[in-house]
Image: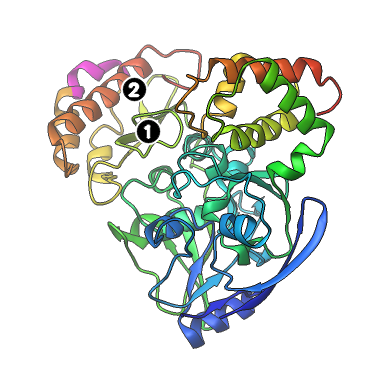
C-alpha cells in the first residue's frame, strides 16, 4: 500500500510515494543515494545506521519510513556539511579514530547527539554516549579520544 | 501486501483498530526485529499495522489530581528515564533499557504490550501497583499491569483495544529504602537475565509497614507475591536475621526460572538478602546498592 511520505532530509523538504513499512535505512540509501548510513546488524544493536530524527539519535533500521513522515532527519551527509560535522571529521582523522571506517558515520552521529546535550563530556560520558555503537577494529580508545578532541576544539559549536 | 495505516488522532486509531483489526505499532524496536527479512528489505507483518507515531494524545507525562503519575503509551524510555515526575524504580529501569538510540525509540506502551518476560518496565510497574488504561471505540477500562500481562507474550488486550496510558499511584507512605538491579551481559543493549525491584517502608522503631519485591526475567512473567511480602510486614527490621531464612525460602518458591534456575534462584536470594540486611543497618541514604 503505497503512501506519500514527506520529511525534511538534511535541511531540504523531500517526499516520495512508497510502502510506509520500508526501513528508513533503505529509503536513505536506495532512494536518496545517501550511502553514508550503513547497515550492520539490522536489529538496532550496532548503531551503524544511526541518524538523528527530530534531534534524537535513532537506528534507522528500526524506523519504518512512515514513522518518519513529517519529521526532520539528519544523516551523516547532512552532519558533514555543518561546522559540527567538519569538527568531528577532523578530530576523528587527527586522532586516528578510523580503521575500516564502517562504524564511523554512526559513531559521528552518536558523538554529535552526545555533544548537543553535553558539550564537554568526561571520558566516561563519551563511552556511555557511544555505547550503542559497535566498532570491530579500533578497541574504541582512539574514537573516545577523538570525540574528546572535538569537544575541546569545537568550543561553542554544540 | 498487508495494509499500513497512519492515524493522526486517537479516535481515528481506535476506529481503524475496530474496523481493520490493525495492530498498534509504537517504537518498533521489537516488531521491526521480529519481522525483519534481511538486508535491503522491508519487514512483512502477518496482520495490518497502524503506525501510532502521530497520535499526540498518546504522549505526555503528568501528575493527576490524585497524585498518580500518568504516562502516555507512546512515551519513550529516554523521557521516562529523565522526567522527575516518574517514580525512581521506573526511571532506573527505563535508563538501563537498550542503548541511547533504543531509548529514543522504545515506548512504555510497547514494552507492556509486547509482554516479553525480559521487558524491563513491567517489573517496576508491577512493584508500584501501576495500571494500564485500555481504550477502544467502546470506551476505556483500567486494569493492573500485573493482571494485564498474563504470561510470555500474553496480555488481556482485546482485539479492538490499544494501550492508551499507564497510571502509577503514589505509595500509601513514602518508601524508606529502594532497590533496583538489572543483570545483563553488556551495559548497553543488554537484555535482562534477571532483575529485582524492591521497596520498603519502615516506621521509626523499625517496624516494616510496607514491603514489596518484584522479580523480572526469571520466569514467564514478572513475579510479585503479596502473600510472601505480607509474611514480613509487621515484623521489625532489627529481627531480620530471624525471619530472613524462612522469607528467602518462601520467595524462592514463588519464582519459576525457566533456564539456569539454580543461578537465577541463587542471585535472587542474594539480592533480597542484601537489600533487607542493608535496610536493617538503617543507612541515611534512600537507595540501597
* Chain containing the residue with disc 1: B
Give the answer, above or below, for where B101 lies relative to B200. below
Q: Quadrant of the C terminus of chain B?
A: top left
Is residue B143 within the magenta segment?
Answer: no
Q: Which residue is mark 1?
A: B198
Residue B210 visible in image: no
Is the C-beta separation of discs 1 and 2 under 8 Å?
yes
* Chain containing the residue with disc 2: B
Image position, residue B271 (x, y; %): 29, 25
Looking at the rendered structure, the secondary structure element under dot 2 is helix
Which disc, if any, is residue B75?
none
Is B163 on the left or on the right of B120, as rendered? right
Residue at 53%, 37% (x, y): give it: B91
Residue at 21%, 16% (x, y): give it: B241
Q: Which residue is mark 2?
A: B275
Residue at 54%, 24% (x, y): give it: A99
> Would you say the magenta stretch is mainly helix, strand or loop?
helix
**Which is nearer the eye, A65 or A40?**
A40
**Which is nearer the eye, A125 or A138?**
A138
Q: How many marks?
A: 2
Image position, residue A124 (x, y; %): 57, 17
Q: Residues within 10 Å of mark 2 (few under 14, many from 20)?
A: many
State which region is magenta: B237-244
**Which is nearer the eye, B219 or B280?**
B219
Residue B16 visible in image: yes
Image position, residue B113 (x, y; %): 42, 60
**Which is nearer the eye, A26 or A70?**
A26
Amino acid at each position: 500500500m503505497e503512501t506519500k511520505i514527506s520529511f525534511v532530509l538534511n535541511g531540504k523538504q523531500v517526499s516520495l510515494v512508497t510502502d510506509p513499512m520500508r526501513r528508513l535505512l533503505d529509503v536513505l540509501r536506495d532512494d536518496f543515494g545517501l550511502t553514508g548510513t550503513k547497515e550492520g546488524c539490522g536489529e538496532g544493536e550496532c548503531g551503524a545506521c544511526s541518524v538523528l530524527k527530530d534531534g534524537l539519535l535513532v537506528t534507522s533500521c528500526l524506523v519504518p519510513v512512515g514513522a518518519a513522515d513529517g519529521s526532520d532527519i539528519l544523516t551523516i551527509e547532512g552532519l558533514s556539511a555543518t561546522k559540527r560535522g567538519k569538527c568531528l571529521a577532523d578530530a576523528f582523522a587527527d586522532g586516528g579514530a578510523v580503521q575500516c571506517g564502517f562504524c564511523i558515520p554512526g559513531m559521528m552521529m552518536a558523538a554529535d547527539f552526545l555533544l548537543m546535550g553535553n558539550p564537554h563530556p568526561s571520558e566516561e560520558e563519551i563511552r556511555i554516549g557511544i555505547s550503542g555503537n559497535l566498532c570491530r577494529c579500533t578497541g574504541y580508545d582512539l574514537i573516545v579520544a577523538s570525540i574528546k578532541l572535538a569537544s575541546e576544539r569545537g568550543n561553542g559549536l554544540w | 501486501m498487508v495494509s499500513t495505516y497512519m492515524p493522526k488522532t486517537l479516535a481515528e486509531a481506535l476506529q481503524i483498530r475496530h474496523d481493520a483489526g490493525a495492530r498498534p505499532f509504537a517504537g518498533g524496536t521489537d516488531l521491526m526485529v521480529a519481522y525483519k527479512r534481511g538486508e535491503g528489505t522491508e519487514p512483512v507483518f502477518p496482520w495490518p499495522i497502524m503506525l501510532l507515531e502521530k497520535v499526540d494524545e498518546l504522549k505526555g507525562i503528568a501528575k493527576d489530581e490524585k497524585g498518580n503519575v500518568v504516562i502516555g503509551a507512546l512515551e519513550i524510555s529516554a523521557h521516562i528515564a529523565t522526567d522527575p515526575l516518574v517514580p525512581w524504580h521506573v526511571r532506573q529501569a527505563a535508563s538501563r533499557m537498550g542503548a541511547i538510540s533504543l531509548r529514543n525509540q522504545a515506548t512504555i506502551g510497547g514494552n507492556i504490550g509486547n509482554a516479553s518476560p525480559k521487558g524491563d518496565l513491567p517489573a517496576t510497574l508491577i512493584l508500584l501497583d501501576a495500571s494500564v488504561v485500555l481504550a477502544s471505540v467502546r470506551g476505556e477500562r483500567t486494569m493492573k499491569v500485573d493482571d494485564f500481562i498474563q504470561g510470555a507474550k500474553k496480555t488481556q488486550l482485546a482485539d479492538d483495544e490499544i494501550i492508551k496510558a499507564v497510571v502509577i499511584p503514589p505509595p500509601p507512605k513514602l518508601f524508606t529504602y529502594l532497590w533496583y538491579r538489572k543483570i545483563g551481559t553488556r551495559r548497553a543493549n543488554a537484555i535482562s537475565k534477571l532483575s529485582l525491584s524492591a521497596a520498603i517502608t519502615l516506621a521509626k522503631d523499625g517496624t516494616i509497614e510496607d514491603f514489596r519485591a518484584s522479580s523480572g526475567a526469571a520466569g514467564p512473567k514478572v513475579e510479585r507475591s503479596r502473600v510472601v511480602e505480607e509474611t514480613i510486614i509487621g515484623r521489625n527490621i532489627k529481627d531480620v536475621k530471624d525471619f530472613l531464612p524462612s522469607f528467602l525460602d518462601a520467595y524462592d518458591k514463588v519464582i519459576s526460572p525457566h533456564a539456569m534456575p539454580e543461578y537465577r534462584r541463587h542471585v535472587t536470594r542474594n539480592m533480597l538478602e542484601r537489600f533487607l540486611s542493608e535496610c536493617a543497618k538503617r543507612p541515611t541514604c534512600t537507595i540501597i546498592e
